[in-house]
Image: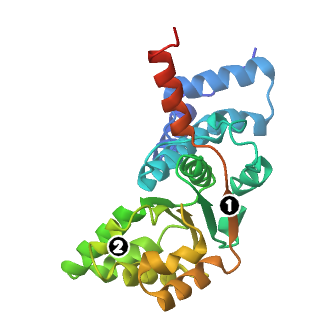
Amino acid sequence: MKKSPPSSLRDLCLRHCQLLRIPITPDELDAVLDRADKESLSHLKFLDLLLGQQAAARNDRSIERRVRAAQFDERQLLETFDWKFNPQIDRLQIEELASADFIRRQSNIIIVGQAGVGKSHLIQAIGMRACAAGYRVLYRTSAKLLNELNASLADKSLPLRLRHYQRPELLIIDEFAFDKVERLDSPESAHLLYKVIVGRHRRRSTALLTNIDFDAWADYLGDPPLAMALLDRLVEGAIIIKIKGRSYRASKAITAKSSENPTP
């Protein structure tokens, strides 16, 4: 039977871990040492057992910080998406986007489809995967984005707010053109949104989800030349997905109503 390392050497190793900010407890070190003796583990396997769990825990904490910072409306997962409900959605394409390679390439995503077809679920699930891959993500509805921009314009903090939106590798803008209230609240809204897109153009990835097709953007923004300039920058090299299908929410509402009022 192999002897345990001298207490002074064991304590020295624990101090090394403390100085390196590796949170290994004496009991954890003793457990790995005991297993290494019993199984005659190699030096590399011993290090993997000692450090692997700590590294995994640190990585999990980093992912959780990025997910919290993203401020998703819901923490959606691709694993919970109902692919059978609207089978025309290309699952392979979505899974490829979830690899986050488009972020590395600094490409944009534009998803067009009516409310309830699953756009928000898909993009937030892609955003969650991006957080897991180490990318900074920020989720905003179009209304919230414009409200924040208008507020920063009022208190003269617009440059700071624009830098905030330029920072994440992936900015998700959901519910674009959901209604005109968000734009009509301020005549500067369209120009402020344009500043966000220009600041990220060819530098960061932007995902925009909308329920109106491109030819209706000019009417929504109220400025055809600006709408064209905005669209040009977004679609350059972008991945464009158009979803046509049934509404999940409408279907669930009908099902719920039917269960409450069964046919006699």
In the rendered image, the quadrant that contains the N terminus is top right
Residue marked by disc 1? 242
Question: Is there any visible trace of residue 196 in the rendered image?
Answer: no
Q: In the rendered structure, which disc, 1 or 2, sits on the residue that comes first in sequence?
A: 2
Q: Relative to 173, say whether 233 is above or below.
A: below
Q: Amino acid at mark 2?
A: Arg
Residue marked by disc 2? 183
Q: Position of residue 52 (x, y in %)?
A: 65, 38
Q: Amino acid at mark 1?
A: Lys
Q: Position of residue 143 (x, y in %)?
A: 36, 63
Q: Quadrant of residue 160?
A: bottom left
Colouring method of the image: rainbow
Give SS at disc 2.
Answer: helix
Please tell me how crowded label 2 is: few (under 14), some (14-19), or many (20+) other residues with Cα within 10 Å.
many
In the image, what residue occupies the spot 54% across and 42% down? Answer: 76
Please tell me how crowded label 1 is: few (under 14), some (14-19), or many (20+) other residues with Cα within 10 Å.
some
Q: Quadrant of residue 222?
A: bottom left
C-alpha distance separating marks 1 and 2: 24 Å
In the image, what residue occupies the spot 52% across and 23% down? Answer: 27
User: Which residue, as the protein is rendered here, is positioned at the far bottom?
Assistant: 225
